[in-house]
Image (cartoon, grey):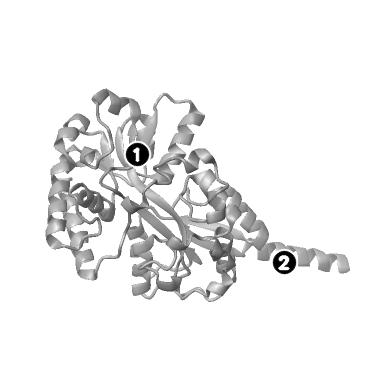
């Protein structure tokens, strides 16, 4: 009888483990496999990764009442917007001792006073990646946003360029090209940016935030607005597959945007034990080293930075030499956000006509 009881207890324990799941809502390729596996071992649970491509996609889901995520990884402006939507709960920083590892320059930002609702995770630069052979053949240097906006370059690249399916990123790049503040809410600035986008659109192949790196790998696209994390992985995949295509990337002289991503806990999470355990784990030096070395994400962990692969650390489009030329997205006022969203919809509709 004792043996039967023990067998039933073991089955119950196994069943409990199988149903102990923590859900994180995050961009793809943004958490090292080894980190996830170690956390699952530590918490005796399953870490389920749910992916979004753009922060606006994630925001739309929360606006519609999304639930079920224990931890979310929004960029700066999205974290601020989630707070204004009352979708996040205040953090107890005493439960996150590994926060001490984060470089102070990334703490207590304007979008996150006192880190009341969010703590920094990593950042991902927005720049241009390109087919090295084809751009050399054309005599084009991708060191300026002009190469995706100026017809002088686009005439040589027609049908071989992609930009993100993201109003914030494309408008920010256009504003930088014009010498403007990439977070400008000035109506005239935004109208000028729209005109630049409209002029360039006929030369672009498509708006693509999801598969552009595959198009670069295949040689179908020669120039793409890109995330540094995606391009790091793409270059690794090309090396492993021994393909002839050579992809490179660089920052632009007018400046670049970077997505300063954060860890937050939604308001509806009642049992936060695993959420805090996961966030603290991701803030550890070990997890930060794994994140940097395995995904190419730019980390803010001071101790980890001294121990990551030197090749990665010296890559300028992963760790920019001049952070003064790197701009984090700011949250638009509701009126401006609506105007930009409407303009973006009109632009997308016009490109299908």
Tell me the residue at 53%/44% (across/down). 294
Q: Which residue is mark 1?
A: 250
Q: Which residue is mark 2?
A: 12
Tell me the residue at 36%/46% (across/down). 210
Residue 168 appears left or right of 39: left
Label ID, residue 230:
none
Quarter-of-image position of residue 38: bottom right
Quarter-of-image position of residue 315: top left
Tell me the residue at 16%/62% (across/down). 186
Residue 202 in picture, x, y percent from top left: 16, 40
Rendered-image quadrant of the C terminus: top left
Against 345, residue 243 (above or below) is above
| Marks 2 and 1, how far apart at CA | 54 Å
Quarter-of-image position of residue 282: bottom right
Of residue 49 and residue 228, the one placed in the foreground of this image is 228
Of residue 290 and residue 255, the one placed in the foreground of this image is 255
Badge 2 element: helix
Residue 17 in picture, x, y percent from top left: 66, 63
Tell me the residue at 27%/40% (across/down). 162
Give the mark count: 2
Whether residue 64 is visible, yes or no, is no
Of residue 69 and residue 223, the one placed in the foreground of this image is 223
The mark lying in front, picked from 2 and 1, is 1
Whether residue 167 is visible, yes or no, is yes
Residue 334 appears left or right of 62: left
Badge 1 element: strand
């Amino acid at each position: 009888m004792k043996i039967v009881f023990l067998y039933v207890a073991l089955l119950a324990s196994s069943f409990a483990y199988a149903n102990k799941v923590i859900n994180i809502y995050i961009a793809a390729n943004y958490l090292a496999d080894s980190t996830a596996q170690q956390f699952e071992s530590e918490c005796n649970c399953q870490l389920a990764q749910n992916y979004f491509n753009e922060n606006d996609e994630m925001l739309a889901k929360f606006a519609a009442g999304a639930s079920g995520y224990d931890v979310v990884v929004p960029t700066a402006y999205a974290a601020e917007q989630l707070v204004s939507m009352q979708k996040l709960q205040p953090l107890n920083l005493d439960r996150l001792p590994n926060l001490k590892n984060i470089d102070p320059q990334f703490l207590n930002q304007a979008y996150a006073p006192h880190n009341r609702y969010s703590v920094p995770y990593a950042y991902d630069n927005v720049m241009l990646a390109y087919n090295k052979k084809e751009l050399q053949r054309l005599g084009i240097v991708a060191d300026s946003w002009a190469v995706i906006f100026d017809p002088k370059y686009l005439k040589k690249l027609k049908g071989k360029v992609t930009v993100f399916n993201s109003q914030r990123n494309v408008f920010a790049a256009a504003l930088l090209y014009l010498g403007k503040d990439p977070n400008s809410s000035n109506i005239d600035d935004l109208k000028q940016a729209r005109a630049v986008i409209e002029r360039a659109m006929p030369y672009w192949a498509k708006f693509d935030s999801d598969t552009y790196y595959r198009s670069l790998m295949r040689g179908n696209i020669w120039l793409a607005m890109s995330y540094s994390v995606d391009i790091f992985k793409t270059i690794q995949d090309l090396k492993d597959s021994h393909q002839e295509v050579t992809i490179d990337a660089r920052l632009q002289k007018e400046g670049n945007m970077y997505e300063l991503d954060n860890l937050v806990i939604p308001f509806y999470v009642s049992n936060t034990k695993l959420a805090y355990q996961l966030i603290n784990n991701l803030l550890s030096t070990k997890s930060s080293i794994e994140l940097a070395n395995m995904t190419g994400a730019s980390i803010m962990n001071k101790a980890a930075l001294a121990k990551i692969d030197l090749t990665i650390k010296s890559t300028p489009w992963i760790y920019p030499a001049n952070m003064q030329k790197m701009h984090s997205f700011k949250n638009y006022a509701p009126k401006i956000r609506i105007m930009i969203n409407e303009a973006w919809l009109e632009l997308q509709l016009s490109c299908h006509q």
